[in-house]
Amino acid sequence: MNHLRLEIIYWSCLLIAMAVSTEAASVWKLPTAQMVYEDLEKCRQESQEEDAATLRCLVKKLGLWTDESGYNARRIAKIFAGHNQMEELMLVVEHCNQMEQDTSHLDDWAFLAYKCATSGQFGHWVKEFMSQKEVER
């Protein structure tokens, strides 16, 4: 009986710990254009101006990329929710992410998937988003 109680307590603690870590990982804030520019400058310095490495560094800092699964389509869609095409955008990002997936060349994967996804309307939205910083000045 005592052994069963200890086991229940153990599993309860484990589940609570998992829930707390999952909640902490899910806390993500929409980036502003200012945040993007600040992180971009840091990443340029860290990657010695190499485009693919700079991009991967930036999207990691913004919480939009993991080396295991690539771009987080849901988070990217949230940034551009005002365009009322979240589902379509998520499909584009997921498609490009899968098409270019290359876990042995992560910088290239991030760069090529970005080029793929931004080759259409989404590319114009990215430019609009980044131009917000110019308006803020």
Image (cartoon, rainbow, N blue to C red):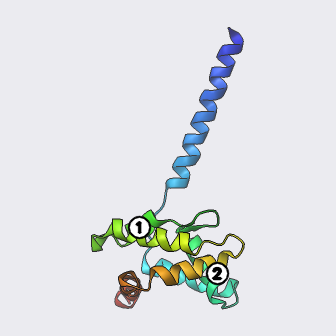
On the image, the x and y values in percent for residue 41 come to 59, 86
Residue bearing mark 1: 90
On the image, the x and y values in percent for residue 4 come to 67, 14
Residue bearing mark 2: 108
On the image, the x and y values in percent for residue 50 come to 66, 90
Q: Residue at x 55, y 41 (%)?
A: 19
Image quarter for residue 32?
A: bottom left
Residue furthest top as drawn: 1
Viewer-side residue, 49 vs 39: 49
Q: Is residue 52 visible?
A: yes
Image quarter for residue 60?
A: bottom right
Q: Is residue 39 visible?
A: no
Q: Quadrant of the N terminus?
A: top right
On the image, the x and y values in percent for residue 64 come to 52, 69
Viewer-side residue, 86 vs 17: 86
| Mark 2 residue type | Asp
**Would you place residue 112 above or below residue 63 in this image?**
below
Q: Residues within 10 Å of mark 2 (few under 14, many from 20)?
A: some
Residue furthest front as drawn: 99
Q: Quadrant of the C terminus?
A: bottom left
Q: Is residue 16 left or right of residue 49?
A: left
| Mark 1 residue type | Met
